[in-house]
Image (spheres, helix red, strand yellow):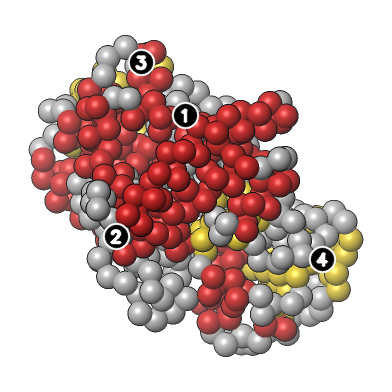
Amino acid sequence: MKKLETEYLIIGSGLVGMAFADTLLTETDANIVIVDRYANPGGHWNMAYPFVTLHQPSAYFGVSSKELSRGVIDTIGLNKGMNDLATGSELLAYFDEVMRQRFLASGRVRYFPMCEYKGEGMFISKLTGKEFSVSYNKLVDATFMTISVPSTHTPNFSVDPKVNFMPLNNLPLVTKKPNGYVVIGGGKTGIDACLWLLSGDVDPDDITWIRPRDSWLLDRQNTQPTESFFNSSVGSLAAQYESISAATSIEDMFVRLEKSGYLLRLDRNIRPTMFHAATISKDEIIELQRIKNVVRMGHVKEIKIDRVSLSEGEIKTGEDYIYVDCSASLERSFGNKTPVPVFCEDCITPQMIRAYQPAFSASMAAYVEANYSGEAEKNRLCSLVPPPNYDVDFIPMTLAMMLNQFSWSQDKKLRQWIRDNRLDGFSRLISNVDKDDHEKIQILTRIQSSALPAITKLQQFNQQLI
């Protein structure tokens, strides 16, 4: 058994592990060992479907020290007029470059791909069988936020062996037109599968979309990080806070959030019961609304050669159908995991401390580790933001995020670091507003006047959920 020594042992070289390691390299002179089960950095992106792209602007993604965005506005497609969205292949190339040119070139990082971590500082190479034992000061478990992806997860329903059942990864391998496509799953993966089929000129009537739950969605135009989008992006924060503070009930809150443009949905006749923070453009919604055969009979229980049994009914299909599995979900990824404090003795478990932004959350956890002392103080600054699943999960998620933001704003050093971190969303946009720009100042005034009332209302609604 080969013995290694390091200050930080990081398990996982996906987005979270890479973002944490990058900031740790910047803020300290520590040595790092990174262990990962894949052959290349990038985590689950190694197993992603070939037509995947980010659903939020590339500017929020990756590691703090290296820009991912190409800095362009898309001029074609359903993201037209907005900042670029990195493709899966671009992401893998980006993570590989960060690993080679930043991490390994520093001389302070040792990287062990194709290895299984066994716990207690032990890991084994899947290629050679060699065993390693690591003596470390801190363990960073960057696997907590690992998500289930279609190509590797096991469906929780039975499938007849004669059925042509595939993850959406295999759609580009189709060689013959089937009698129909059945897309299983109403989340972002299901959305991507449907959009890809429609982009290939598949007749919308040939698509059956099984959506066990409809979802509230975020408008991508409100997530744009550049100044030209200030009114929609920062303005959406003002609209969000005003909608929450004025709401007379939880149901009324969602009505107001939709009316203000903060939330979107695919079907105005169906009230969503799911919220996974998926981001979408209005043009994508228009495209998806071309699919009329939407099945809302609960979750799939069994697929046979000519029918699909669901928890609330059955639909007839027929021979020579392709069933596209998009049923991997955040609920199945995180449902059996119990959140733990980010900092606990010699273990650091990066988790979401700002909603929608795992890269920023991991980067800030590393900054706090390097610049603050005391476990209680570190955990105060890195209070967890619970991941959403149901619609009402928007309430504790948003409340936790707003309380964190207020706490951070009271720390001058941390406030400046957040402003300078490229992974942060709007801090730099807001701080650079000219005092003579009355339109922008008015938006900021709306945010300031409605933030505290929104927190108070969220606290009231949250008590109703307990």
Tell which tag, 3 or 4, sits nearer the viewer: 3
Q: Which numbered disc flags the more N-terminal residue, 1 or 2?
A: 2
Gap between marks 1 and 4, in whole Å? 45 Å
Residue on which the image places disc 4? 308
Amino acid type shown at disc 2: Glu
Query: The residue under label 4 is which amino acid type?
Result: Val
Q: Which residue is mark 1?
A: 403
Which residue, given by chain and number where applicable, does mark 2 sit on? 227
Which amino acid type is marked by label 1?
Leu
Mark pair 2, 4: CA separation: 49 Å
Image location of residue 390, percent across then percent down:
67, 44
Quarter occupied by residue 324? bottom right
Pointer 2 or 3: first along the chain: 2
Question: What is the crowding at mark 4: few (fewer than 14 residues within 10 Å), some, or many (at least 20)?
Answer: many
Q: Is residue 63 left or right of residue 347?
A: left
Q: On screen, 198 above or below 34?
A: below
Q: Secondary structure at mark 4?
A: strand
Number of other residues with Cα within 10 Å of mark 2, as a class: few under 14, some 14 to 19, many 20 or more: some
